[in-house]
Amino acid sequence: MSGASQSSMAKTLATIHKVITRGLEVTKSRSQSFAEEGFDPSLRSGFISYARTFVNLTHAHHDTEEVLIFPYAQEKMPDTSFDSLIAQHREITALLDQMKAAIDEAEKSAEAAGPLSRMSGIATAMGEIWQPHIGEEESIFSAEKVNAVVTPEEQGKLMQQAAQHGMSHAGPDYLAAPFVLHNLSAEDRAFMAGEMPPIISQELVPVVWKDQWAPMAPFLLP
Ligand SMILES: [Fe+2]
Ligand SMILES: [Fe+2]
């Protein structure tokens, strides 16, 4: 992974949080407008893929934190408790399971207003936990606190493992990778691309996988 040795844990976590925060916001606002104004047939499959990728990526992020990042951090920061963060993951997971069921229903039903409106409500409820959750996490994993106990090399190695673990649990790469890169502003996208093997941002996402994620493009940043 090029650039991984320079990557900082604080910045990588905060950047992934931005991806999920935008995913949540777009899922919430668009499911609400589709429920009110009708589910545009030309956008339907793209929106379903977008919302599913959002759910998969959020699950994968929590799993990566619980399997790799929190246990590692617990050793380095023995006085820090991760219990409330893990409890918040449980609450968010329950909402994501409801979201998944509503997405499946919205995909299947001709008149999708009911499940779409449920999706929006679930996203609103999730936002109420998500915002304080990432606030707490980014305060525990501030650059200052992390840099005091973990060398840049170790941070790079851990973030590389985290990226591999996360991507292998986030659903098909041809949806997850463009979802990560294109829910970020140009500057954040350049940073995140530098955390991935160059082939992903230079060839796979823009060329090889383009047709597979194109239906999601109306919901992503250009
Ligand atoms: Fe978390
Ligand atoms: Fe997180």
Image (cartoon, helix red, strand yellow):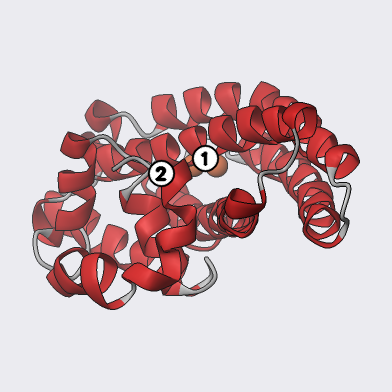
Q: Nearer the viewer, residue 164 or 126?
A: 126
Give the image location of residue 95, x and y in percent: 78, 42
Is the residue 186 above or below the residue 153 in the image? Answer: above
Front position in the image: 142 or 61: 61
Residue occupied by mark 1: 23
Residue drawn at (41%, 29%), measured in percent from left and top? Answer: 138
Q: Mark 1 and 2 residues: CB-CB less than 8 Å, in contact?
A: no
Badge 1: few (under 14), some or many (20 or more) residues near its Cα, within 10 Å? many
Judged left or right of residue 138, residue 66 is right
Residue at point 76%, 53% (across, down): 103
Residue reaching furthest to the bottom: 208
Q: Which residue is mark 2?
A: 220
210 to the left or right of 90:
left
- Residue at 49% in and 41% down: 20
N-term mark: 1 or 2: 1
Dot 1: what SS? helix
What amino acid type is highlighted by mark number 2?
Leu
Q: Position of residue 53 (x, y in %)?
A: 56, 58
**Image location of residue 131, percent across then percent down:** 57, 23
Horizontal arrangement in the rendering, residue 63 relative to residue 99 (left or right): left
Tell me residue 190's x, y (percent): 15, 46
- Residue type for callout 1: Gly
Eyeballing the image, is 16 above or below 135?
Answer: below
